[in-house]
Image (cartoon, rainbow, N blue to C red):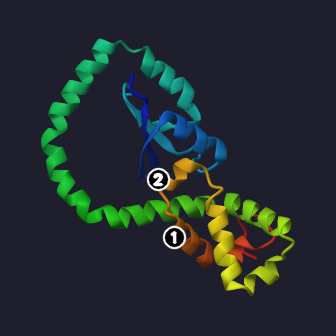
């Protein structure tokens, strides 16, 4: 049996499609929000991730025959549209990918900051001393990337993560999670 694929949307922006177990991990870790929307095979409409388990249980209770008929009808209806949209999509993938990456990372600033400050403390460094050492910051941000949940790698490369952290370093090295210092 194929694993359930979950389509994710945040603020009208399509984040992508992930296996159910990856979605659960990202939701638990705080990278996905309960207010993000999702859709999976067998569902009529998008729903909030806060209803993930109950919504999937309802969708799974539908008969296989009904799901197969719906899938066939959907496939026929969208076959032509998919061909047209694929051309447009290839033009916008780079821009949308950057938008998704930035949105995901901006929404995760408190998570990143908490772990960054903990790592600094474990190394016996202060935020002020770290801000003065670009090479140390680069290595620190790289080490922090290795700690993010694996499903996030689908959206964010190590280089993107490090560049994002450098850009937001004043906010990240502040004293209150999610607040500028």
Q: Is residue 89 left or right of residue 95?
A: left
Query: Can residue 168 be seen at all in this image of the molecule?
Result: no
Of residue 155 and residue 60, the one placed in the foreground of this image is 155
The x and y percentages for residue 143 are 66, 65
Q: Quadrant of the C terminus?
A: bottom right
- Above-or-below relation of 12 to 74: below
The residue that label 2 is drawn on is 154
Indicate the quadrant where residue 178 lies.
Answer: bottom right
Labels 2 and 1: the sequence-earlier one: 2
Q: Residue furthest right?
A: 124
- Helix, strand or loop at label 2? It is helix
Q: Which residue is found at the position 58% from the left and 37% from the top?
A: 24
Q: Answer with left or right where residue 144 lies relative to residue 48.
A: right
Q: Residues within 10 Å of mark 1 (few under 14, many from 20)?
A: few
Quadrant of the snapshot with the N terminus: top left
Which residue is at 70% across, 74% downward?
A: 171
């Amino acid at each position: 049996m194929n694993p359930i694929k979950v389509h994710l949307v945040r603020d009208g922006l399509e984040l992508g499609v992930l296996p159910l177990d990856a979605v659960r991990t990202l939701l638990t870790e705080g990278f996905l929000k309960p207010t993000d929307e999702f859709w999976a095979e067998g569902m009529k409409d998008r729903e909030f991730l806060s209803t993930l388990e109950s919504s999937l249980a309802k969708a799974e209770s539908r008969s296989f025959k009904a799901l197969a008929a719906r899938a066939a009808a959907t496939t026929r209806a969208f076959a032509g549209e998919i061909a047209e949209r694929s051309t447009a999509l290839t033009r916008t993938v780079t821009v949308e990918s950057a938008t998704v990456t930035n949105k995901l990372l901006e929404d995760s600033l408190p998570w990143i900051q908490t772990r960054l400050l903990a790592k600094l403390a474990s190394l016996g460094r202060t935020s002020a001393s770290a801000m003065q050492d670009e090479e140390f910051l680069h290595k620190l941000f790289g080490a922090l990337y290795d700690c993010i949940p694996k499903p996030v790698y689908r959206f964010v490369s190590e280089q993107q993560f490090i560049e994002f952290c450098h850009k937001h370093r004043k906010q990240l090295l502040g004293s209150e999670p999610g607040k500028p210092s």
